[in-house]
Each structure stands twice: as structure tokens, then as C-alpha cells.
Amino acid sequence: MPTHTPPSVLPTTLRFMASRLFGHSRTADAPMPHDEMRRRVESVLQHMPDQVLRCDWVDLSGALPDWLDSGVTVAPGAEFTLLARGRLMASRAFDVGVGPQVGLWYRVGAAPIAKLVGEASTINTGAAGGALHFTVKPPGEFSDAQGNFDPAVPRTALGGSYQLAVIQWRGDVGAALATAAAADPELFGPALQRRREPKMPPAGWDYLWRLGQGEIYTPAP
């Protein structure tokens, strides 16, 4: 009589271990409280009235079902800075969650979707301009680069939320970021560093749009 060999539990175990490590690697420190982030950002910007065009605040729930029109419009060719904090929880029991650099996506006007690469990033809209939209989700659930969701992939609401500051600058963006970073290196320093020394992928190679942009691959010396 043939015997049936049960499927190995190793793949499932490895996936579980990876999710645990992934979650802890993103959440080793408690997320900054939303009120603290807002207080610190506004404390810096209020001393830079000639360099700040405007700062808008956006709260994004993990239960957000679709794209959110933030009500913010950016001009073609403009640069704006996104500061994001928070965590979306896939499992509170196992402490598995993701930060904004994994789960926060944006779209400027009709331009293709893009993912935030870090909690503090400055974005050049290029030729694009228009309304700024956001959504929160794990990578891989889109059916196209315009941000439509794949109907074959069920969307599950997540716990937690992200808080986002959308800062539009006047004049020299680099100088404005340097001023802000000098006042609060923790919040603004990473955005300044990314603008000065962006981690670009090798020439002729791009990140898979379904997974979004990252800072993993750079040209070899």
C-alpha cells in the first residue's frame, strides 16, 4: 500500500521566520507618536517662512480601501519632501508590521505609481504635476502601473496607520533641506542625504514596478 508523505513544513516555517525577522527589522524602535512628529516638523518649519511654500498633513489608515486624494497639488518640475512615520500591522499577535518605506505608495497626477523608498524622501515630479494621491498596501497587489488593484488578489485591511507631512519648498530645495536638517537631523537629515547622494540603480536597470522603488542595488565601482 503506497504511503503518503505529508508536505514539508519547512517552507511555511521559513516564511514565518522571515516575516518575524522582517517585522522586527522594521519595528525595532517604537514608531514616533503622531503628535510628536507634527510638533517637531512645525517647530522647524516655522523658522523658515521664506523657504517653505506650504506643509500639508495626511493621515493614512491601514484600512484605506482605495487611493486617497490628499487635496494637495504639486507643480510640474517641482520638488517636494515626504516625511512619514507609523506602522501597518499584518499581525499584532506576532508583531509583524511594515513601515512607510514598504507600504506607502503615491501618484502625482496621471504619472505612474511609485513607492516611498524611505521615511524621509524628496521627490522630483519631473514633467508630471497635479493632484497627489496615496494608498497603503503591501507590494504586488496592483494590476497595472496606473495603480488599479488586481481583482484576483483580495485586499485585507491592516491595523495601524501612517502620518505624512507633504512639504513644498520655495527657491533652492537643497539649501532649505540643509537648514531643516541642521535644526532636526533625525527627521530631515535622511531626506537631505538622499537628495545629495541618491542610491540609483545600475544604468539600464529598473526595479519591478509591482514591488516599487528601493535602495538595494547601486552601480558597482
Image (tube, helix red, strand yellow):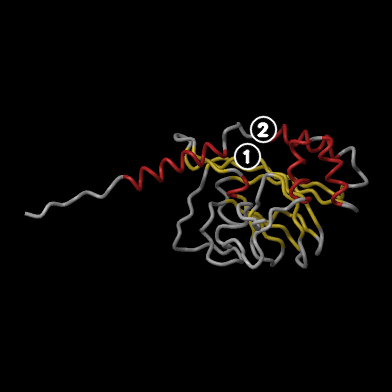
First in sequence: mark 2 or mark 1? 2
- Give whichever of 58, 193 is nearer the camera: 193
Q: Position of residue 50 (x, y in %)?
A: 93, 46
Q: For marks 2 and 1, give the CA distance.
A: 8 Å
Residue for badge 2:
33
Q: Is residue 158 left or right of residue 44?
A: left
Residue 76 higher or lower than 62, as above or below:
below
The residue shown at (76%, 63%) is: 130
180 above or below 4? above
Instruction: Classify mark 2: helix, strand or loop.
Output: loop
Q: Label 1 neighbourhood size at 10 Å, few (<14), some (14-19), many (20+)?
A: many
- Residue 151 or 104: which is nearer the viewer? 104
Q: Secondary structure at mark 1?
A: strand
Q: Nearer the viewer, residue 17 or 45?
A: 17
Residue occupying the point 78% across, 34% down: 40
Q: Quadrant of residue 39?
A: top right
Classed neighbour count for the residue bearing mark 2: other residues with Cα under 10 Å, few (<14), some (14–19), many (≥20) = few
Type of amino acid under label 2: Pro
